[in-house]
Amino acid sequence: MQLSIMRLTSPEAPSTVELRLVGSIDVGTRQALLDAAASALSAADALTIDAGGVDFVDSVGIGALIMIGQMAQRARVDFRISRQSVQLERVLRIVGLDSHWHQTALTADAPIGVDR
């Protein structure tokens, strides 16, 4: 499966990095996500993952998100998931991680780019 990772920063908050994900977080995309997160964490005071475009996540993908959270904690970087696809929200709820990382869910009526 594939995962597109777009790294975004804002001139107003250059030390805040957003990784916008589209596709699957799984065994085939795990390392690319970890590499992108490590790069972002080395230059950021805050890391946000926009997961509104995630259409599939497996246990390896959940493990990658946990690792990113741990990496952020060690680097003393604020970490959150700004949006969750319905698929990701469901898996995080099942595994008991739905209250971590300051998550906000993506609802069907939420336009792209708007936190809920």
Image (cartoon, rainbow, N blue to C red):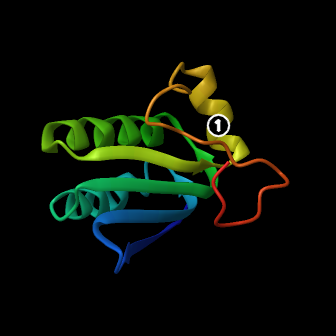
Q: Is residue 6 above or below residue 47?
A: below
**Horizontal side, residue 112 vs residue 11: left or right:** right
* Residue found 34% across the figure and 80% down from its top: 11
Q: Nearer the viewer, residue 41 or 11?
A: 11
Dot 1 alpha-carbon crowd within 10 angstroms: few under 14, some 14 to 19, many 20 or more: some
Residue at the extreme bottom: 11
Corner quadrant of residue 31: bottom left
Identity of the residue drawn at 55% across and 21% down: 95
Q: Position of residue 61 (x, y in %)?
A: 46, 43
Quadrant of the rendered structure where residue 42 is?
Answer: bottom left
> Could you say which is closer to the camera, residue 79 or residue 22?
79
Can the viewer see residue 26?
Answer: no
Picture coordinates of residue 77, whole percent (x, y): 23, 47
Q: Residue at x 59, y 50 (%)?
A: 83
The residue where tag 1 is placed is 89
The quarter of the image holding the N terminus is bottom right
Say which amino acid is labelled 1. Answer: Glu
Position of residue 63 measured from the top left corner of the image (x, y, whole percent): 39, 35
The quadrant holding residue 38 is bottom left
Q: Is residue 2 above or below residue 84?
A: below
72 above or below 48?
A: above
Is residue 91 shown left or right of residue 21? Answer: right
Which sits in the foreground, 108 or 24?
108
Kindly tell me whether residue 27 is visible in this rendering: yes
| Residue at screen point 49% across, 65% down | 20
